Image: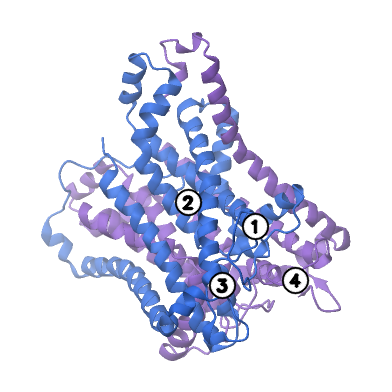
Amino acid sequence: MAVAAPQRAPEAPTQLRPGRGRDRSPLSLFFVAGLWLSLALAIVFLMTLILTTAIDGAPRLDANLFTEYDSTLFPEKTGARAGILGTMWLMVATALLAVPLGIAAALYLEEFADGRRWYNRLIELNLQNLAAVPSVIYGMLAVAFMSLVGRNQTDIVIGGALALALLILPVIIITTREAIRAVPTEIRDASLALGATPWQTAWRQVLPSAVPGISTGTILALSRAIGEAAPLLLLGVAVSVRFDPNGLLSAFTALPIQVFNWTAASQDEYKTAAAAAIIVLLTMVLLLNGLAIYIRNHFQRRW
Amino acid sequence: MPDIADTQLGLRRRVRPGEILIVSLLRLAAVASIFITVGIVVSLLMPALDFFEQVRVFDFLTGTDWRPNLAPQAFGVLPLVGGTLMTTLVGLLVAVPFGLGAAMYLSEYASRGLRRKLKPVLELLAGVPSVVYGFFALQFITPVVLRDWFGVEVDFTNALSAGIVLGIMIVPTVASLSEDAMSAVPHALRQGSFAMGANRMQTTLRVVFPAATSGIAAAIVLGLSRAVGETMIVALAAGSRPNLSADVREGMQTMTGYIANTASGENVVGSLSYNTLFAVGLLLFAITLVINIISIALVRRLREAY
Protein backbone atom coordinates (compact mmCIF):
# COMPACT_ATOMS: atom_id res chain seq x y z
CA MET A 1 0.00 0.00 0.00
CA ALA A 2 1.60 3.21 -1.09
CA VAL A 3 1.34 5.64 1.77
CA ALA A 4 2.62 8.98 0.59
CA ALA A 5 4.97 7.65 -2.03
CA PRO A 6 7.55 10.24 -2.99
CA GLN A 7 7.52 11.51 -6.54
CA ARG A 8 9.39 9.27 -8.93
CA ALA A 9 12.35 10.85 -10.69
CA PRO A 10 11.76 11.14 -14.43
CA GLU A 11 13.09 8.17 -16.35
CA ALA A 12 16.49 8.86 -17.87
CA PRO A 13 16.36 9.24 -21.66
CA THR A 14 18.75 6.36 -22.23
CA GLN A 15 19.27 3.24 -20.17
CA LEU A 16 22.12 3.90 -17.77
CA ARG A 17 24.71 1.18 -17.81
CA PRO A 18 28.31 0.91 -16.65
CA GLY A 19 30.83 -0.98 -18.78
CA ARG A 20 29.72 -4.58 -19.19
CA GLY A 21 32.84 -6.23 -17.83
CA ARG A 22 32.53 -4.39 -14.53
CA ASP A 23 29.21 -6.06 -13.75
CA ARG A 24 30.69 -9.51 -14.24
CA SER A 25 33.03 -9.62 -11.26
CA PRO A 26 32.28 -12.62 -8.99
CA LEU A 27 31.19 -10.40 -6.13
CA SER A 28 28.69 -8.42 -8.15
CA LEU A 29 27.32 -11.56 -9.83
CA PHE A 30 26.83 -12.97 -6.33
CA PHE A 31 25.07 -9.75 -5.34
CA VAL A 32 22.67 -9.88 -8.28
CA ALA A 33 21.97 -13.52 -7.51
CA GLY A 34 21.05 -12.50 -3.96
CA LEU A 35 18.67 -9.85 -5.23
CA TRP A 36 17.13 -12.31 -7.68
CA LEU A 37 16.67 -14.78 -4.86
CA SER A 38 14.73 -12.25 -2.78
CA LEU A 39 12.24 -11.75 -5.59
CA ALA A 40 12.16 -15.45 -6.41
CA LEU A 41 11.41 -16.28 -2.78
CA ALA A 42 8.32 -14.09 -2.86
CA ILE A 43 7.10 -15.76 -6.05
CA VAL A 44 7.93 -19.30 -4.91
CA PHE A 45 6.19 -18.66 -1.60
CA LEU A 46 3.03 -17.48 -3.36
CA MET A 47 3.05 -20.50 -5.71
CA THR A 48 3.63 -22.94 -2.84
CA LEU A 49 0.83 -21.39 -0.83
CA ILE A 50 -1.63 -21.69 -3.69
CA LEU A 51 -0.50 -25.19 -4.72
CA THR A 52 -0.44 -26.83 -1.28
CA THR A 53 -3.76 -25.29 -0.33
CA ALA A 54 -5.29 -26.42 -3.61
CA ILE A 55 -4.05 -29.98 -3.01
CA ASP A 56 -5.33 -29.92 0.58
CA GLY A 57 -8.69 -28.55 -0.40
CA ALA A 58 -9.31 -30.36 -3.69
CA PRO A 59 -11.31 -33.25 -2.13
CA ARG A 60 -13.80 -30.77 -0.71
CA LEU A 61 -14.23 -28.55 -3.76
CA ASP A 62 -17.58 -30.19 -4.35
CA ALA A 63 -21.14 -28.98 -4.70
CA ASN A 64 -21.72 -29.28 -0.94
CA LEU A 65 -19.20 -26.53 -0.31
CA PHE A 66 -21.35 -24.09 -2.26
CA THR A 67 -24.83 -25.30 -1.33
CA GLU A 68 -24.55 -26.40 2.32
CA TYR A 69 -24.40 -24.37 5.51
CA ASP A 70 -21.86 -24.86 8.29
CA SER A 71 -22.45 -28.23 9.93
CA THR A 72 -21.33 -29.32 13.38
CA LEU A 73 -22.76 -32.81 13.02
CA PHE A 74 -21.24 -33.69 9.67
CA PRO A 75 -17.81 -32.02 9.34
CA GLU A 76 -17.24 -33.92 6.08
CA LYS A 77 -20.02 -32.04 4.33
CA THR A 78 -19.88 -28.65 6.00
CA GLY A 79 -20.40 -25.85 3.52
CA ALA A 80 -19.54 -22.22 2.93
CA ARG A 81 -22.81 -21.11 1.34
CA ALA A 82 -23.61 -18.59 4.08
CA GLY A 83 -20.01 -17.33 4.07
CA ILE A 84 -19.84 -16.79 0.32
CA LEU A 85 -23.15 -14.93 0.26
CA GLY A 86 -22.21 -12.97 3.39
CA THR A 87 -18.91 -11.89 1.87
CA MET A 88 -20.70 -10.69 -1.27
CA TRP A 89 -23.21 -8.69 0.77
CA LEU A 90 -20.34 -7.28 2.79
CA MET A 91 -18.38 -6.28 -0.31
CA VAL A 92 -21.29 -4.37 -1.87
CA ALA A 93 -22.28 -2.64 1.37
CA THR A 94 -18.67 -1.70 2.13
CA ALA A 95 -18.22 -0.23 -1.34
CA LEU A 96 -21.45 1.78 -1.06
CA LEU A 97 -20.30 3.27 2.26
CA ALA A 98 -16.63 3.86 1.54
CA VAL A 99 -16.37 4.83 -2.14
CA PRO A 100 -18.54 8.00 -2.28
CA LEU A 101 -17.12 9.29 1.00
CA GLY A 102 -13.56 8.49 -0.04
CA ILE A 103 -13.82 10.17 -3.44
CA ALA A 104 -15.49 13.26 -1.96
CA ALA A 105 -12.76 13.63 0.64
CA ALA A 106 -9.98 13.12 -1.90
CA LEU A 107 -11.54 15.60 -4.32
CA TYR A 108 -11.71 18.20 -1.58
CA LEU A 109 -8.14 17.65 -0.44
CA GLU A 110 -6.67 17.76 -3.95
CA GLU A 111 -8.80 20.38 -5.69
CA PHE A 112 -10.22 22.74 -3.11
CA ALA A 113 -8.20 22.59 0.09
CA ASP A 114 -5.44 25.05 0.82
CA GLY A 115 -2.61 22.71 1.77
CA ARG A 116 -0.91 25.39 3.83
CA ARG A 117 -3.75 25.69 6.34
CA TRP A 118 -3.10 23.82 9.59
CA TYR A 119 -6.40 21.93 9.57
CA ASN A 120 -5.82 20.56 6.09
CA ARG A 121 -2.33 19.45 7.12
CA LEU A 122 -3.84 17.81 10.18
CA ILE A 123 -6.27 15.89 7.96
CA GLU A 124 -3.37 14.76 5.81
CA LEU A 125 -1.30 13.58 8.78
CA ASN A 126 -4.34 11.89 10.26
CA LEU A 127 -5.02 9.95 7.04
CA GLN A 128 -1.46 8.67 6.86
CA ASN A 129 -1.76 7.37 10.40
CA LEU A 130 -5.25 5.88 9.90
CA ALA A 131 -4.01 3.87 6.91
CA ALA A 132 -1.66 2.04 9.27
CA VAL A 133 -3.99 1.49 12.24
CA PRO A 134 -4.38 -2.27 12.91
CA SER A 135 -7.59 -3.73 11.50
CA VAL A 136 -8.78 -5.17 14.84
CA ILE A 137 -9.03 -1.63 16.15
CA TYR A 138 -11.63 -0.82 13.48
CA GLY A 139 -13.70 -3.71 14.79
CA MET A 140 -13.70 -2.11 18.23
CA LEU A 141 -14.69 1.22 16.70
CA ALA A 142 -17.60 -0.39 14.86
CA VAL A 143 -18.82 -2.10 18.06
CA ALA A 144 -18.77 1.23 19.88
CA PHE A 145 -20.57 2.97 17.03
CA MET A 146 -23.28 0.32 16.86
CA SER A 147 -23.99 0.60 20.56
CA LEU A 148 -24.07 4.38 20.18
CA VAL A 149 -26.94 4.11 17.69
CA GLY A 150 -28.67 1.62 19.97
CA ARG A 151 -27.87 -1.66 18.26
CA ASN A 152 -26.76 -4.36 20.65
CA GLN A 153 -26.67 -7.01 17.99
CA THR A 154 -23.47 -6.20 16.10
CA ASP A 155 -23.00 -9.33 13.99
CA ILE A 156 -25.14 -7.94 11.16
CA VAL A 157 -24.17 -7.00 7.61
CA ILE A 158 -24.21 -3.24 8.19
CA GLY A 159 -21.98 -3.60 11.26
CA GLY A 160 -19.38 -5.56 9.35
CA ALA A 161 -19.62 -3.21 6.38
CA LEU A 162 -19.14 -0.22 8.66
CA ALA A 163 -15.95 -1.68 10.16
CA LEU A 164 -14.53 -2.59 6.75
CA ALA A 165 -15.54 0.72 5.17
CA LEU A 166 -13.76 2.70 7.89
CA LEU A 167 -10.78 0.38 7.48
CA ILE A 168 -10.37 0.97 3.74
CA LEU A 169 -11.50 4.63 3.66
CA PRO A 170 -7.97 6.04 4.23
CA VAL A 171 -6.58 3.74 1.53
CA ILE A 172 -9.27 4.83 -0.94
CA ILE A 173 -8.67 8.51 -0.16
CA ILE A 174 -4.90 8.16 -0.59
CA THR A 175 -5.07 6.27 -3.90
CA THR A 176 -7.81 8.55 -5.24
CA ARG A 177 -5.69 11.59 -4.43
CA GLU A 178 -2.79 10.08 -6.34
CA ALA A 179 -5.05 9.49 -9.35
CA ILE A 180 -6.39 13.06 -9.21
CA ARG A 181 -2.90 14.49 -8.81
CA ALA A 182 -1.79 12.69 -11.98
CA VAL A 183 -4.26 14.72 -14.07
CA PRO A 184 -2.23 17.53 -15.68
CA THR A 185 -2.85 21.11 -14.52
CA GLU A 186 -3.27 22.20 -18.15
CA ILE A 187 -6.63 20.42 -18.30
CA ARG A 188 -7.85 22.42 -15.32
CA ASP A 189 -6.47 25.65 -16.74
CA ALA A 190 -8.14 25.08 -20.10
CA SER A 191 -11.46 24.29 -18.46
CA LEU A 192 -11.34 27.39 -16.27
CA ALA A 193 -10.27 29.51 -19.23
CA LEU A 194 -13.34 28.37 -21.13
CA GLY A 195 -15.50 29.67 -18.31
CA ALA A 196 -16.18 26.58 -16.25
CA THR A 197 -16.47 27.08 -12.51
CA PRO A 198 -14.03 25.27 -10.17
CA TRP A 199 -16.64 22.63 -9.34
CA GLN A 200 -17.57 22.12 -13.01
CA THR A 201 -13.87 21.68 -13.75
CA ALA A 202 -13.45 19.13 -10.99
CA TRP A 203 -16.62 17.21 -11.83
CA ARG A 204 -16.50 17.22 -15.64
CA GLN A 205 -12.77 17.26 -16.38
CA VAL A 206 -10.62 16.13 -13.47
CA LEU A 207 -12.76 13.33 -12.07
CA PRO A 208 -13.51 11.58 -15.40
CA SER A 209 -9.81 11.67 -16.30
CA ALA A 210 -8.97 10.07 -12.97
CA VAL A 211 -11.58 7.29 -13.10
CA PRO A 212 -9.22 4.45 -14.14
CA GLY A 213 -6.79 5.27 -11.34
CA ILE A 214 -9.60 5.63 -8.83
CA SER A 215 -11.20 2.32 -9.79
CA THR A 216 -7.88 0.48 -9.61
CA GLY A 217 -7.26 1.77 -6.08
CA THR A 218 -10.81 1.14 -4.97
CA ILE A 219 -10.94 -2.43 -6.27
CA LEU A 220 -7.62 -3.25 -4.59
CA ALA A 221 -8.95 -1.79 -1.33
CA LEU A 222 -12.15 -3.85 -1.63
CA SER A 223 -10.20 -7.02 -2.29
CA ARG A 224 -8.32 -6.30 0.92
CA ALA A 225 -11.59 -5.73 2.77
CA ILE A 226 -13.23 -9.03 1.82
CA GLY A 227 -10.23 -10.98 3.13
CA GLU A 228 -10.33 -9.33 6.55
CA ALA A 229 -11.50 -11.44 9.46
CA ALA A 230 -10.12 -9.58 12.48
CA PRO A 231 -12.63 -6.70 12.68
CA LEU A 232 -15.49 -9.14 12.13
CA LEU A 233 -14.36 -11.25 15.09
CA LEU A 234 -14.76 -8.20 17.32
CA LEU A 235 -18.32 -7.74 16.07
CA GLY A 236 -19.05 -11.30 17.18
CA VAL A 237 -19.67 -12.62 13.67
CA ALA A 238 -20.11 -16.36 14.19
CA VAL A 239 -19.39 -19.30 11.91
CA SER A 240 -22.60 -21.22 12.56
CA VAL A 241 -25.03 -19.19 10.48
CA ARG A 242 -27.49 -21.54 8.81
CA PHE A 243 -29.45 -19.11 6.62
CA ASP A 244 -28.79 -16.72 3.75
CA PRO A 245 -28.31 -13.07 4.69
CA ASN A 246 -31.32 -11.16 3.35
CA GLY A 247 -30.62 -7.53 4.16
CA LEU A 248 -28.37 -5.04 5.84
CA LEU A 249 -29.77 -5.89 9.27
CA SER A 250 -29.47 -9.62 8.79
CA ALA A 251 -27.02 -11.68 10.85
CA PHE A 252 -24.35 -13.18 8.63
CA THR A 253 -21.04 -14.93 8.45
CA ALA A 254 -18.18 -14.29 6.07
CA LEU A 255 -15.76 -16.53 4.21
CA PRO A 256 -12.64 -15.46 6.18
CA ILE A 257 -14.49 -16.14 9.45
CA GLN A 258 -15.38 -19.64 8.27
CA VAL A 259 -11.78 -20.23 7.23
CA PHE A 260 -10.58 -19.06 10.66
CA ASN A 261 -12.96 -21.25 12.61
CA TRP A 262 -12.44 -24.32 10.47
CA THR A 263 -8.65 -23.92 10.65
CA ALA A 264 -8.82 -23.64 14.43
CA ALA A 265 -11.14 -26.68 14.72
CA SER A 266 -9.54 -29.97 15.70
CA GLN A 267 -11.11 -32.40 13.18
CA ASP A 268 -9.21 -32.92 9.94
CA GLU A 269 -12.42 -32.69 7.92
CA TYR A 270 -12.71 -29.04 8.90
CA LYS A 271 -9.11 -28.35 7.86
CA THR A 272 -9.88 -29.76 4.42
CA ALA A 273 -13.00 -27.62 4.26
CA ALA A 274 -10.91 -24.59 5.31
CA ALA A 275 -8.49 -25.24 2.44
CA ALA A 276 -11.40 -25.51 0.01
CA ALA A 277 -12.94 -22.28 1.36
CA ILE A 278 -9.53 -20.59 1.00
CA ILE A 279 -9.49 -21.53 -2.68
CA VAL A 280 -12.89 -19.86 -3.10
CA LEU A 281 -11.72 -16.79 -1.17
CA LEU A 282 -8.43 -16.57 -3.09
CA THR A 283 -10.30 -16.88 -6.38
CA MET A 284 -12.47 -13.91 -5.44
CA VAL A 285 -9.42 -11.87 -4.33
CA LEU A 286 -7.39 -12.82 -7.42
CA LEU A 287 -10.29 -11.93 -9.72
CA LEU A 288 -10.57 -8.49 -8.12
CA ASN A 289 -6.79 -7.99 -8.33
CA GLY A 290 -6.78 -9.11 -11.95
CA LEU A 291 -9.58 -6.69 -12.74
CA ALA A 292 -7.66 -3.85 -11.08
CA ILE A 293 -4.48 -4.66 -13.01
CA TYR A 294 -6.44 -4.95 -16.26
CA ILE A 295 -8.02 -1.53 -15.74
CA ARG A 296 -4.64 -0.05 -14.91
CA ASN A 297 -2.97 -1.45 -18.00
CA HIS A 298 -5.73 -0.77 -20.50
CA PHE A 299 -7.53 2.38 -19.41
CA GLN A 300 -5.00 4.36 -17.41
CA ARG A 301 -3.95 7.39 -19.42
CA ARG A 302 -0.40 8.58 -19.30
CA TRP A 303 0.17 12.24 -19.99
CA MET B 1 -0.99 21.65 -5.35
CA PRO B 2 -2.94 23.82 -7.79
CA ASP B 3 -5.55 25.73 -5.90
CA ILE B 4 -8.26 26.39 -8.43
CA ALA B 5 -10.42 28.61 -6.31
CA ASP B 6 -7.58 30.94 -5.57
CA THR B 7 -5.83 31.60 -8.87
CA GLN B 8 -4.89 35.09 -9.95
CA LEU B 9 -7.98 35.19 -12.15
CA GLY B 10 -9.89 36.08 -9.04
CA LEU B 11 -12.61 33.53 -9.63
CA ARG B 12 -13.43 33.66 -5.98
CA ARG B 13 -14.88 37.14 -6.22
CA ARG B 14 -18.06 35.87 -7.81
CA VAL B 15 -20.20 34.23 -5.14
CA ARG B 16 -21.74 30.98 -6.32
CA PRO B 17 -23.97 29.54 -3.58
CA GLY B 18 -24.24 26.13 -5.25
CA GLU B 19 -20.49 25.78 -5.46
CA ILE B 20 -20.03 26.80 -1.85
CA LEU B 21 -22.57 24.17 -0.79
CA ILE B 22 -20.85 21.43 -2.79
CA VAL B 23 -17.41 22.32 -1.51
CA SER B 24 -18.71 22.37 2.06
CA LEU B 25 -20.10 18.86 1.57
CA LEU B 26 -16.75 17.68 0.21
CA ARG B 27 -14.98 19.33 3.13
CA LEU B 28 -17.30 17.49 5.50
CA ALA B 29 -16.22 14.19 3.94
CA ALA B 30 -12.57 15.09 4.49
CA VAL B 31 -13.16 16.19 8.07
CA ALA B 32 -14.96 12.87 8.71
CA SER B 33 -11.54 11.21 8.74
CA ILE B 34 -10.68 13.23 11.85
CA PHE B 35 -13.87 11.94 13.47
CA ILE B 36 -12.71 8.39 12.80
CA THR B 37 -9.57 8.97 14.85
CA VAL B 38 -11.53 10.67 17.61
CA GLY B 39 -14.02 7.80 17.50
CA ILE B 40 -11.25 5.23 17.83
CA VAL B 41 -9.74 6.98 20.82
CA VAL B 42 -13.10 7.41 22.57
CA SER B 43 -14.32 3.90 21.88
CA LEU B 44 -11.09 2.41 23.21
CA LEU B 45 -10.73 4.78 26.12
CA MET B 46 -14.20 4.42 27.68
CA PRO B 47 -14.10 0.66 28.37
CA ALA B 48 -10.37 0.86 29.11
CA LEU B 49 -11.04 3.44 31.83
CA ASP B 50 -13.55 1.04 33.41
CA PHE B 51 -10.83 -1.59 33.31
CA PHE B 52 -8.26 0.67 34.94
CA GLU B 53 -10.65 1.36 37.79
CA GLN B 54 -10.16 -2.25 38.81
CA VAL B 55 -6.60 -2.80 37.71
CA ARG B 56 -3.84 -0.28 38.34
CA VAL B 57 -2.18 1.06 35.18
CA PHE B 58 1.25 0.35 36.66
CA ASP B 59 0.38 -3.29 37.39
CA PHE B 60 -1.03 -3.65 33.88
CA LEU B 61 2.07 -2.29 32.17
CA THR B 62 4.72 -3.97 34.32
CA GLY B 63 3.09 -7.24 35.39
CA THR B 64 4.56 -10.45 34.03
CA ASP B 65 1.53 -12.62 34.70
CA TRP B 66 -1.45 -12.62 32.30
CA ARG B 67 -4.35 -14.71 33.58
CA PRO B 68 -7.56 -12.85 32.74
CA ASN B 69 -9.90 -15.85 32.91
CA LEU B 70 -8.55 -18.09 35.65
CA ALA B 71 -8.72 -17.38 39.37
CA PRO B 72 -6.63 -15.82 40.76
CA GLN B 73 -6.81 -13.29 37.97
CA ALA B 74 -3.71 -11.37 36.98
CA PHE B 75 -3.49 -8.58 34.43
CA GLY B 76 0.17 -8.03 33.66
CA VAL B 77 0.33 -7.36 29.93
CA LEU B 78 4.06 -8.00 29.44
CA PRO B 79 3.69 -11.62 28.25
CA LEU B 80 1.43 -10.41 25.41
CA VAL B 81 3.82 -7.57 24.57
CA GLY B 82 6.67 -10.09 24.60
CA GLY B 83 4.77 -12.34 22.19
CA THR B 84 4.20 -9.42 19.83
CA LEU B 85 7.86 -8.47 20.12
CA MET B 86 9.11 -11.96 19.23
CA THR B 87 6.82 -12.54 16.24
CA THR B 88 7.56 -9.01 14.96
CA LEU B 89 11.30 -9.53 15.37
CA VAL B 90 11.23 -12.77 13.36
CA GLY B 91 9.01 -11.04 10.81
CA LEU B 92 11.44 -8.15 10.33
CA LEU B 93 14.41 -10.54 10.07
CA VAL B 94 12.62 -12.08 7.09
CA ALA B 95 11.06 -8.95 5.58
CA VAL B 96 13.98 -6.51 5.69
CA PRO B 97 16.61 -8.48 3.71
CA PHE B 98 14.15 -9.95 1.23
CA GLY B 99 12.13 -6.75 0.88
CA LEU B 100 15.25 -4.65 0.30
CA GLY B 101 16.69 -7.22 -2.09
CA ALA B 102 13.53 -7.20 -4.15
CA ALA B 103 13.41 -3.39 -4.08
CA MET B 104 17.05 -3.05 -5.20
CA TYR B 105 16.49 -5.46 -8.05
CA LEU B 106 13.32 -3.74 -9.19
CA SER B 107 14.73 -0.23 -8.91
CA GLU B 108 18.32 -0.69 -10.14
CA TYR B 109 18.47 -3.83 -12.27
CA ALA B 110 15.09 -4.66 -13.79
CA SER B 111 14.13 -3.19 -17.14
CA ARG B 112 10.94 -1.20 -17.25
CA GLY B 113 9.03 -4.07 -18.87
CA LEU B 114 10.21 -6.63 -16.33
CA ARG B 115 9.33 -4.28 -13.50
CA ARG B 116 5.83 -3.92 -14.86
CA LYS B 117 5.47 -7.72 -14.87
CA LEU B 118 6.96 -8.31 -11.43
CA LYS B 119 5.22 -5.60 -9.44
CA PRO B 120 1.73 -7.12 -9.78
CA VAL B 121 3.12 -10.37 -8.32
CA LEU B 122 4.28 -8.47 -5.25
CA GLU B 123 0.90 -6.75 -5.06
CA LEU B 124 -0.75 -10.15 -5.21
CA LEU B 125 1.39 -11.28 -2.29
CA ALA B 126 0.13 -8.22 -0.40
CA GLY B 127 -3.43 -9.05 -1.41
CA VAL B 128 -3.56 -12.56 0.05
CA PRO B 129 -5.91 -12.44 3.08
CA SER B 130 -4.04 -12.78 6.36
CA VAL B 131 -6.25 -15.63 7.54
CA VAL B 132 -4.95 -17.58 4.53
CA TYR B 133 -1.38 -16.90 5.64
CA GLY B 134 -2.35 -18.13 9.10
CA PHE B 135 -3.67 -21.39 7.66
CA PHE B 136 -0.49 -21.78 5.62
CA ALA B 137 1.74 -21.20 8.67
CA LEU B 138 -0.17 -23.77 10.68
CA GLN B 139 -0.57 -26.41 7.98
CA PHE B 140 2.63 -26.10 5.96
CA ILE B 141 5.38 -23.95 7.48
CA THR B 142 5.27 -25.56 10.94
CA PRO B 143 4.85 -29.27 10.07
CA VAL B 144 6.59 -29.45 6.70
CA VAL B 145 9.17 -26.66 6.43
CA LEU B 146 10.27 -26.31 10.06
CA ARG B 147 9.86 -29.87 11.35
CA ASP B 148 10.52 -32.03 8.27
CA TRP B 149 12.91 -29.94 6.17
CA PHE B 150 14.91 -28.13 8.82
CA GLY B 151 14.36 -30.48 11.76
CA VAL B 152 13.52 -27.67 14.19
CA GLU B 153 11.71 -28.94 17.27
CA VAL B 154 8.79 -26.53 17.42
CA ASP B 155 5.51 -26.57 19.30
CA PHE B 156 2.31 -27.07 17.30
CA THR B 157 1.78 -23.31 17.46
CA ASN B 158 4.95 -21.25 17.69
CA ALA B 159 6.27 -17.73 17.26
CA LEU B 160 8.80 -18.82 14.64
CA SER B 161 6.41 -19.96 11.92
CA ALA B 162 3.98 -17.11 12.64
CA GLY B 163 6.89 -14.65 12.41
CA ILE B 164 8.23 -16.10 9.17
CA VAL B 165 4.84 -15.86 7.47
CA LEU B 166 4.30 -12.41 8.97
CA GLY B 167 7.62 -11.40 7.41
CA ILE B 168 6.63 -12.68 3.98
CA MET B 169 3.35 -10.81 4.30
CA ILE B 170 5.11 -7.46 4.84
CA VAL B 171 7.78 -8.02 2.15
CA PRO B 172 5.58 -6.19 -0.42
CA THR B 173 5.13 -3.21 1.94
CA VAL B 174 8.87 -2.90 2.55
CA ALA B 175 9.77 -3.60 -1.08
CA SER B 176 7.32 -1.23 -2.73
CA LEU B 177 8.06 1.78 -0.51
CA SER B 178 11.84 1.22 -0.63
CA GLU B 179 11.64 0.90 -4.39
CA ASP B 180 9.82 4.23 -4.56
CA ALA B 181 12.52 5.80 -2.41
CA MET B 182 15.36 4.40 -4.52
CA SER B 183 13.70 5.34 -7.80
CA ALA B 184 13.38 8.89 -6.50
CA VAL B 185 17.17 9.22 -6.24
CA PRO B 186 18.23 11.54 -9.10
CA HIS B 187 19.84 9.88 -12.09
CA ALA B 188 22.72 12.36 -11.97
CA LEU B 189 24.03 10.58 -8.88
CA ARG B 190 24.11 7.24 -10.72
CA GLN B 191 25.67 8.81 -13.80
CA GLY B 192 28.37 10.35 -11.65
CA SER B 193 29.05 7.02 -9.97
CA PHE B 194 29.27 5.15 -13.28
CA ALA B 195 31.52 7.86 -14.69
CA MET B 196 33.92 7.31 -11.81
CA GLY B 197 34.17 3.67 -12.87
CA ALA B 198 31.90 2.11 -10.25
CA ASN B 199 29.90 -0.91 -11.32
CA ARG B 200 26.22 -1.37 -10.74
CA MET B 201 26.57 -3.15 -7.40
CA GLN B 202 28.85 -0.44 -6.01
CA THR B 203 26.49 2.23 -7.29
CA THR B 204 23.48 0.53 -5.72
CA LEU B 205 25.10 -0.08 -2.34
CA ARG B 206 27.22 3.05 -1.94
CA VAL B 207 25.31 5.74 -3.82
CA VAL B 208 21.64 4.89 -4.22
CA PHE B 209 21.15 3.12 -0.90
CA PRO B 210 22.64 5.90 1.29
CA ALA B 211 20.74 8.53 -0.68
CA ALA B 212 17.46 6.72 -0.07
CA THR B 213 18.03 5.82 3.60
CA SER B 214 15.21 7.83 5.11
CA GLY B 215 12.68 6.43 2.63
CA ILE B 216 13.92 2.91 3.25
CA ALA B 217 13.75 3.47 6.99
CA ALA B 218 10.17 4.70 6.58
CA ALA B 219 9.35 1.54 4.62
CA ILE B 220 10.78 -0.69 7.34
CA VAL B 221 9.02 1.21 10.09
CA LEU B 222 5.70 0.96 8.24
CA GLY B 223 6.31 -2.78 7.83
CA LEU B 224 6.97 -2.93 11.58
CA SER B 225 3.65 -1.23 12.25
CA ARG B 226 1.82 -3.75 10.08
CA ALA B 227 3.58 -6.65 11.79
CA VAL B 228 2.61 -5.40 15.25
CA GLY B 229 -1.02 -4.95 14.24
CA GLU B 230 -1.45 -8.13 12.20
CA THR B 231 -4.01 -10.37 13.84
CA MET B 232 -5.13 -13.49 12.01
CA ILE B 233 -1.70 -15.03 11.38
CA VAL B 234 -0.69 -14.83 15.02
CA ALA B 235 -4.15 -15.81 16.27
CA LEU B 236 -3.89 -19.07 14.33
CA ALA B 237 -0.18 -19.87 14.28
CA ALA B 238 1.48 -18.21 17.29
CA GLY B 239 -0.68 -19.85 19.91
CA SER B 240 -3.07 -18.82 22.64
CA ARG B 241 -0.85 -19.27 25.68
CA PRO B 242 0.57 -16.12 27.28
CA ASN B 243 4.24 -16.93 27.52
CA LEU B 244 7.00 -14.49 28.39
CA SER B 245 9.86 -16.23 26.66
CA ALA B 246 12.54 -15.48 24.10
CA ASP B 247 12.40 -18.98 22.64
CA VAL B 248 10.60 -18.55 19.34
CA ARG B 249 10.06 -22.31 19.03
CA GLU B 250 7.44 -22.07 21.79
CA GLY B 251 3.87 -20.96 21.38
CA MET B 252 3.13 -17.49 22.66
CA GLN B 253 0.11 -15.23 22.56
CA THR B 254 0.46 -11.72 21.13
CA MET B 255 -1.63 -8.64 21.91
CA THR B 256 -3.65 -8.99 18.73
CA GLY B 257 -3.84 -12.76 19.22
CA TYR B 258 -5.37 -12.24 22.66
CA ILE B 259 -7.92 -9.79 21.24
CA ALA B 260 -8.91 -12.20 18.44
CA ASN B 261 -9.10 -15.27 20.67
CA THR B 262 -11.10 -13.51 23.37
CA ALA B 263 -13.40 -11.71 20.96
CA SER B 264 -14.34 -14.95 19.19
CA GLY B 265 -15.57 -16.38 22.51
CA GLU B 266 -18.60 -15.30 24.53
CA ASN B 267 -18.22 -12.03 26.40
CA VAL B 268 -20.69 -10.11 28.49
CA VAL B 269 -20.58 -6.44 27.52
CA GLY B 270 -19.17 -4.39 30.39
CA SER B 271 -17.61 -7.35 32.20
CA LEU B 272 -13.98 -7.18 33.27
CA SER B 273 -12.83 -9.66 30.62
CA TYR B 274 -14.69 -7.64 27.96
CA ASN B 275 -13.04 -4.42 29.10
CA THR B 276 -9.65 -6.17 29.05
CA LEU B 277 -9.99 -6.36 25.26
CA PHE B 278 -10.15 -2.59 25.05
CA ALA B 279 -7.27 -2.03 27.46
CA VAL B 280 -5.06 -4.24 25.28
CA GLY B 281 -6.52 -2.56 22.18
CA LEU B 282 -5.64 0.87 23.56
CA LEU B 283 -2.07 -0.20 24.23
CA LEU B 284 -1.84 -1.64 20.71
CA PHE B 285 -3.21 1.57 19.21
CA ALA B 286 -0.74 3.66 21.21
CA ILE B 287 2.22 1.52 20.13
CA THR B 288 1.28 1.59 16.44
CA LEU B 289 0.57 5.34 16.66
CA VAL B 290 4.13 6.02 17.84
CA ILE B 291 5.55 3.77 15.10
CA ASN B 292 3.39 5.43 12.44
CA ILE B 293 4.43 8.94 13.51
CA ILE B 294 8.09 7.93 13.20
CA SER B 295 7.41 6.54 9.72
CA ILE B 296 5.55 9.68 8.61
CA ALA B 297 8.35 11.91 9.90
CA LEU B 298 10.88 9.85 7.94
CA VAL B 299 8.86 10.21 4.74
CA ARG B 300 8.78 13.98 5.33
CA ARG B 301 12.56 14.07 5.52
CA LEU B 302 12.80 12.12 2.28
CA ARG B 303 10.57 14.62 0.51
CA GLU B 304 12.71 17.51 1.67
CA ALA B 305 15.88 15.78 0.46
CA TYR B 306 15.28 16.20 -3.28
Q: Going by the image, does B234 lie left or right of A201?
A: right
Foreground pick, A32 / B288? B288
Give me the disc on residue B266. 4
Amino acid type at image mark 3: Gln
Q: Going by the image, does B225 lie left or right of A40?
A: right
CA gap between label 1 and label 4 equals 16 Å
Foreground pick, A104 / A43? A104
Amino acid type at image mark 4: Glu
Residue at image mark 2: B218
Badge 3 sits on which subunit?
A
Q: Position of residue B102 (x, y in %)?
A: 33, 62
User: Is residue B195 shown above or below B90?
Assistant: above
Q: Position of residue A263 (x, y in %)?
A: 55, 79
CA gap between label 3 and label 4 equals 17 Å
Residue under disc 1 on the same chain as residue under disc 4: no
Residue A62 seen by the camera: yes
Residue at image mark 3: A258
Residue under disc 4 on the same chain as residue under disc 2: yes
Residue under disc 1 on the same chain as residue under disc 2: no
Give me the disc on residue A139. 1
